[in-house]
Amino acid sequence: MKVLLNTGSTIDEGRLAKGGNKYSEEYRLECAVCWLSPSNFESLGCPEKVKVTSKDEKHSIIVYTKCTDAMMDGDVFMPRAIWSNVIIDPYTFSTGSPLYKGSPVTVEAAEGEVLSAEDVVLNLYMGGK
């Protein structure tokens, strides 16, 4: 399913990040998640997890799902954290900040592990070292 990804801070993401808890299970459960509208959630088969893939199809990440009326069909939300950073468009258009809003992505039901923040860094950015 092709959708637009928006990212941003949540109250709990900020509380945990500022409190130095980025490697905690609580942080992973708060931030390694993709919010979906009920209709989009249903059309994916009501999955526990989804794989979100970048527009260029070079990067993807498996995260938990959250079905919520706060989302409109065709839009998804992920807290701004390492999981969403894997798939957002890195181009800054000379602003120094990537686009955190309106990035085209693909979302599909998935099986597999939702990586911890530490494992995302080690496996995706450090080449598995």
Image: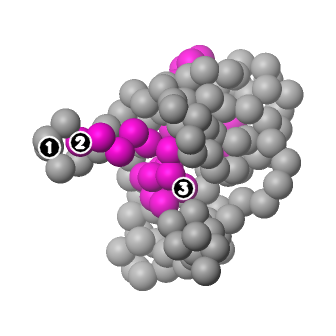
- On residue 95, the disc is 1
Dot 2 alpha-carbon crowd within 10 angstroms: few under 14, some 14 to 19, many 20 or more: few
Above or below 95: residue 76: above
The circle on residue 36 is none
Q: Quadrant of the C terminus?
A: bottom right
In percent of width and height, residue 23 lies at: 55, 78
User: Which residues fall within the magenta stretch?
Assistant: 65-92
Q: Answer with left or right where residue 48 lies relative to residue 129.
A: right
Type of amino acid under label 2:
Thr
Task: Tell me the CA gap for discs 2 and 1.
Answer: 5 Å
Q: Are marks 1 and 3 in contact (CB under 8 Å)?
A: no
Residue 9 shown left or right of residue 48 in the figure: left
- In the picture of the structure, the residue carrying the numbered disc 3 is 83
x, y percent for residue 89: 39, 39
Q: Is residue 51 above or below residue 68?
A: below
Who's the residue at 61% across and 56% down the image?
32
Q: Is residue 68 visible?
A: no
User: Foreground residue, 117 or 92?
Assistant: 92
Give the alpha-carbon distance from disc 3 to disc 2, as whole Å.
Answer: 18 Å
User: How is the structure coloured here?
Assistant: one colour
| 2 and 1 marks in contact (CB < 8 Å) | yes
Image side of residue 3 versus residue 19, left or right? right
Q: Which residue: 64% across, 62% down?
A: 29
Rendered-image quadrant of the N terminus? top right
Give the labeled residue for mark 2: 92
